[in-house]
Structure formats: C-alpha cells, structure tokens
Amino acid sequence: MPELPEVETIVRALRRSPTDEHLAADRRWPSLLGLTLRGAELGWERTLAAPSPAEFFARLPGQRVERIGRRGKFLRFDLSRGDTLLIHLRMSGDLRVEPAADARGRPLPLEPHDRAVFYFAEGVRLAFNDARKFGRIWLTDNPAAVLSGLGPEPLDPELTPADFYHRLHARRRLLKPLLLDQSFLSGLGNIYTDEALHLAGLHPLTLSHQVTPAAAARLLAAIRAVLEEGIRRNGASIDWAYRGGSFQNTFRVYGRAGQPCPTCGGTIERLLVGQRGTHFCPTCQPLPPN
DNA sequence: AGCATTACCCGCACGC
DNA sequence: TGCGTGCGGGTAATGC
C-alpha cells in the first residue's frame, strides 16, 4: 500500500511527543519515542525477515525506542542497545498503536491479519497488520546492510536536477519501471509515479536516456510536488485500505482510466507496463519519436 | 560481464 | 463462481 508519503505520515504520527497538542484528539497514535520494549509476538512467522524468531524474542526486551525515521519506504526504529528495527509495509501493511489491555488489565483483542505485535512496558502495543502477508520486519545491528541498495531520497535537496539528469542517462530504461526501481530513486510507487509523469508531461514509455535536461528538471520538480502534496494530505487511502489520508481526492490520472484529463479534458488511458497498471493522458504526455 | 526485460511468485480482499 | 486487479519487490530465465 504505502509509498513515501504514507510511510512519512505514519513515521510522523509515531514520533509525536505525548505532549503534542494533536495527541489528545487522536488516540490512535501515542508517541513511541522513549518507550521500552517488553516483548513481541508473531502471528505469521514469515513476516520476520531476520533474525530467527528465537533470537528476535531474546534481543528485543529492554530496548528503548530512541529514534523513529524513514528511508525510502522503510520505517526505521533505532533502539537503545545498538539494534535497529526496520519495517517494510509492502502492499497492505499498516501500523496501529493502542493500549495493550483494558482498565482491568485484561488484554485487548487483536485484529484479523495482525502479523506482529510489539508490547511496551508502558502498557501500549504496536500492531503490524498486513492482510496480504508481503510486509517484512528486520531486527539488526547493521541496518545499512538491508538499506544499502536504495537510491537517493527524492526530497533530499542534495539531489540536484543535474544529478537526476545524469542518473537518467546512466540507464536505458522506460521511465515508468525505472522510477519504480528503488535502487534508482527510493520512495516512489505506482500512484506517485503516474501522478509525477503526468505533471511533468512525460509519457511512461519514454526512454530514460532520451530525456532532455529541461525535462529531467521538470520530472524531478514534479516528483517532489506530488510527494509533498501527498505528505501534506497525510497520504492516500485507496481500495479497502483506508488510512485517513486524502491524496486520493486529487489523483490526476491514477485509477482514472476513461475519465477526463484535468489538464486538457482528453481521455485518460491505461497501459500495462512491467505488470503494473499505468495511467496517463496521451495528449499531455506524448511519446517522443524514437 | 553486465544491464535490461519478462514472467512468475507471494496471501488476501474486493468489485464486476 | 470465477476472474481481474492491486500504495511492492525478489528471483529466475532470457535477450542484447
């Protein structure tokens, strides 16, 4: 489900200080910062990518959450004994923070599809819910080994239009699958890629090495614009996975095949590119002659 | 050799 | 009921 803006929204919510003014209004997200892990349980063992369940259960208790962050579509929790907890939500993963027990101390029931649950000494728990079971969790003292293949962060100002242009020309690939490739750029998924290509006026089948410097600059600006708009709207909520965000209300092309293009009024088309549904406006996003 | 492409796989829920 | 589809990504096989 989640792409960069959805993961960023979750990270910001998990990070919020308990004294934060919003917390009183939204009890779904007490801050996890500073809380101490007491234990965990797994509802689906394969959700744990590493280490073994035995080692996972042995290493977790007693570690405090010192930092919460994001790298690409990974959530990252730095713990107090040098370990890092990494969570990738893949297609259908979601997180909840909630009390672990009621006022009488009775454990509260879990939801269907809760694959992992982290219990904290302070009485709250973090539940990882994932209907499709594609999501993964790592507990590691070397997070760089898991994250090392990721390309640059699209919102990092150190990534300049010139860098981006050079990266595009270092490959000879279709723009759509290239932008989805996390080793090229980290954080984009199917929705924001289609939205960015439309905003930049580039056909998804454009070859990366034929993008001009001006078009590369436009594309990078469009990627940043759609990601920032997504973050501002707390992400997108689509299909049966509702997460509170509203970016879906501003989709220009994604999921709108057969409907009018917001720019020119022409009809949005849908293609299959690399097994992924791809939505675009043939008028606003012409395919350059080879 | 190394890069790019394609097909397939992984569980499940939903709409038609 | 059956089929197509999906906010992701890993792997294997094939092609240039």
Image (spheres, coloured by chain):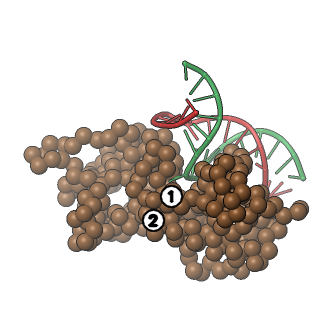
Chain colours: A brown, B red, C green
Which element type, helix, strand or loop, lies under badge 2?
A: loop
Q: Check disc 2: other Cα within 10 Å, few if <14, some if 14-19, many if 20+.
A: some
Residue on which disc 2 sits:
A233
Residue shown at 38% from the left, 49% from the top: A128
- Residue A122, given in percent of the width and then of the height, sits at 19, 58
Q: Nearer the viewer, residue A155 or A88?
A: A155
Return the chain for callout 2. Answer: A
Mark 2 residue type: Arg
Which element type, helix, strand or loop, lies under badge 1?
A: helix
Marks 1 and 2: which is nearer the front? 1
Q: Nearer the viewer, residue A263 or A270?
A: A263
Q: Earlier in the sequence, mark 1 or mark 2?
A: 2
Q: State yes or no: discs 1 and 2 in contact (Cβ < 8 Å).
A: yes
Residue on which disc 1 sits:
A249
Going by the image, does A78 lie left or right of A216? Answer: left
Residue shown at 32% from the left, 44% from the top: A41
- Residue A208, given in percent of the width and then of the height, sits at 77, 65
Going by the image, does A86 lie left or right of B1? Answer: left
Q: Check disc 1: other Cα within 10 Å, few if <14, some if 14-19, many if 20+.
A: few
Question: Would you say residue A164 is visible in this rendering?
Answer: no
- Residue A184, given in percent of the width and then of the height, sits at 66, 64
Return the chain for callout 1. Answer: A
Residue shown at 56% from the left, 76% from the top: A156
What residue occupies the far front of the structure in this picture? A265
Residue A83 against residue A279 in the figure, above or below: below
Residue shown at 59% from the left, 56% from the top: A191
Same chain for the residues under marks 1 and 2 in the image: yes
